[in-house]
Amino acid sequence: MKSECNLPDNSSEGGWIHCPRCYASLRDRVLGSHEYLCCGRCGEQVKSLRPGRTMIAAWAFAMAALVTFIPANLNPILIFSVAGNSQENLIITGVRALWMQGFQPLGALVFFSAILAPFFYLASVSYVSASWTLQLRLPFAGAALRLAEALESWNLLPVFAIACMVSVVKLRTLGTVSWEPGSLWILATAVFTMLTIQCFDRKCAELYLEGGK
């Protein structure tokens, strides 16, 4: 499994490599853990070695998160019972409740950050990582990379998972709460999402899309 992200082979000539931004020549060298080789002219990061951060792992974790994302949204997270009345709660249940109570902007924000943004972030990372891993020039891979970069900070599904666990403490003072299978799917999706963020190397993807591996 490769963890080193280099410029294309045809950019190296006799131990020299070229900056992908300003095309300045700089001496290639072996990098240590977490070291970077940057252009002295424009400051662009030309080469890096980041153990544990690989596009192959990012692709695997992103695909796993997408698979668990579906049952996480289709299965109830918990059942809340009070005064003999029970209600199943899904992710979309909170969005619908906020919308019906007049908090449309907040409901839209929760829908975007807990459902839309996580899905499109994971799909974009999976697409770009597949292009890098399979060495295929997939169409719109550059746009997918930019989308993943824009949505990463809006992917709040792990925060939503923590909020669910915290809210149960308050709900248990009002009634009975029982966890349902959806909670396990959300937890799995949150873990895979965090692993995807840790493994996905945006700079490595940029260098590949600009000049190849």
Image (cartoon, rainbow, N blue to C red):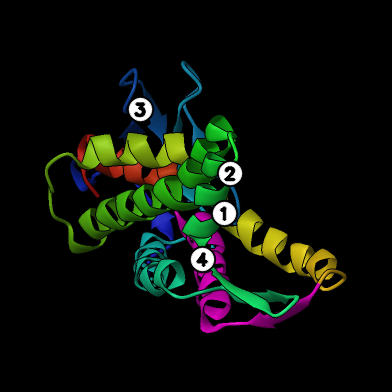
Vertical position of residue 112 compared to residue 84: above or below: above
Vertical position of residue 196 compared to residue 100: above or below: below
Q: Is residue 193 magenta?
A: yes
Residue to which mark 2 is pinned: 98
Residue to which mark 4 is pinned: 90
Residue to which mark 1 is pinned: 94
The image quadrant of residue 55 is bottom left
Distance between mark 4 and mark 3 Cα atoms: 49 Å
> Residue 207: x and y, percent?
32, 39
The image quadrant of residue 68 is bottom left
Closer to the camera: disc 1 or disc 3?
A: 1
Main SS of the magenta part reads helix
Distance between mark 3 and mark 2 Cα atoms: 50 Å
Image: magenta residue range: 175-200
Mark nearer the N terminus (4 vs 2): 4
Residue to which mark 3 is pinned: 19
Q: Amino acid at mark 1?
A: Gly
Q: Amino acid at mark 3?
A: Cys
Distance between mark 4 and mark 1 Cα atoms: 7 Å
Residue drawn where x is 12% and y is 47% of the image: 137
Mark nearer the N terminus (1 vs 3): 3
Mark 2 secondary-structure assignment: helix
Q: Amino acid at mark 4?
A: Leu
The image quadrant of residue 75 is bottom left
Q: Residues within 10 Å of mark 1 (few under 14, many from 20)?
A: some
Residue drawn where x is 34% and y is 17% of the image: 22
Mark nearer the N terminus (4 vs 3): 3
Q: Residues within 10 Å of mark 4 (few under 14, many from 20)?
A: some
Vertical position of residue 176 compared to residue 106: above or below: below
User: Is the residue under label 2 in contact with that under label 4 (CB below 8 Å)?
Assistant: no
Closer to the camera: disc 3 or disc 2?
A: 2
**Relative depth, front residue between 204 and 187:** 187
